[in-house]
Image (spheres, helix red, strand yellow):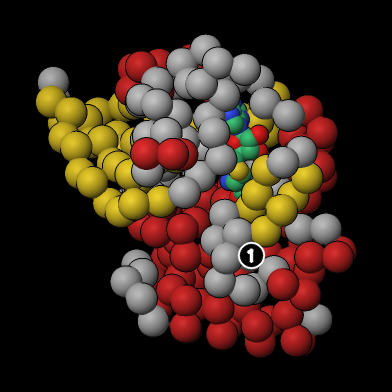
Amino acid sequence: MAEFERERARMVDEQLAGRDIDDPRVLAAMRSVPRHRFVTPRQAAAAYEDHPLPIGNGQTISQPYIVALMCQAARVRAGDRVLEIGTGSGYAAAVLGELAAEVHTVERHSELARAATRALQPWPNVHVHEGDGTLGLPECAPFDAVLVTAAGPDVPEPLVEQLGEGGRLVIPVGEPRFGQQLIRLTLQGDELLRDRLMPVVFVPLIGRHGTAP
Ligand code: SAH
């Protein structure tokens, strides 16, 4: 146990603070969530390494740095209502659960949604939904921040529509073969500001407003 804590502290110091993660709330959240509980026992020893890991169903838990970068870019505040598309292991949802008031996360694979629901029991403010996240979650909108952890050809329109005033949408866009970009859209009045953050590699976003199943 103490060994995992040491590894987690080293992960935060070297992979996050040692790069460009400087939001103290994000660093604290990444220091507290036990990432090894979100991977299979076989992968636990590698949980704090600087790369993604397989979680079954052909999917991956993102590299710790990418999770921290997306949370920082989304400027998640303590009172925020957050939507995540692509629950996967549930790890990023747990980090968001530390940062925000209420988190809704959507996963299309029922097996992953079930496992994540169990892993997320210590975060009662995180709610797992099974379904096509490219449709968003209109019944829970509007959201202060939306994070998408799978990449589609374009930004799904429903996710933009479900942003509240000042809302931030962080999403990788592009096809695997042609390169994906992590971008941030910020809704300011009638304007949608667009920032390019960095080139990334994510699994495909599959659904009505993503890649066809
Ligand atoms: N945030 C996750 C990373 C998971 S990888 C973590 O911390 O572990 C991306 C996930 O997106 C995969 O589990 C994949 O099944 C899911 N996904 C892809 N398209 C989706 C869609 N349209 N709706 C919901 N989930 C989707």
Left or right: where does residue 160 sit relative to residue 87?
left
Q: Is residue 5 above or below residue 38?
A: below
Q: Residue furthest front?
A: 177
Q: Is residue 180 above or below residue 137?
A: below
Q: Secondary structure at mark 1?
A: loop
Q: Residues within 10 Å of mark 1 (few under 14, many from 20)?
A: some
Left or right: where does residue 105 sit relative to residue 89?
left
Quadrant in the picture for the N terminus: bottom right
Give the camera-side residue of 96 and 43: 43
For the question of whether residue 78 can be seen, the reply is: no
| Amino acid type, label 1 | Val
Residue occupying the point 39% across, 81% down: 18
Left or right: where does residue 207 sit relative to residue 66?
right
Q: How many marks?
A: 1
Left or right: where does residue 161 sit relative to residue 202?
left
The spot of residue 67 in percent (x, y) is 49, 56
Residue occupying the point 46% across, 39% down: 176
For the question of whether residue 3 can be seen, the reply is: yes
The spot of residue 40 in percent (x, y) is 83, 58
Quadrant in the picture for the C terminus: top right
Give the camera-side residue of 58 and 83: 58
Corner quadrant of residue 177: top left
- Displayed-image quarter of ligand 1: top right
The spot of residue 71 in percent (x, y) is 42, 53
Label 1 C-beta lies within 8 Å of the nearest ligand 1 atom: no
Q: Residue furthest right?
A: 41
Residue occupying the point 47% across, 65% down: 65
Q: Name the residue that disc number 1 marks.
A: 33
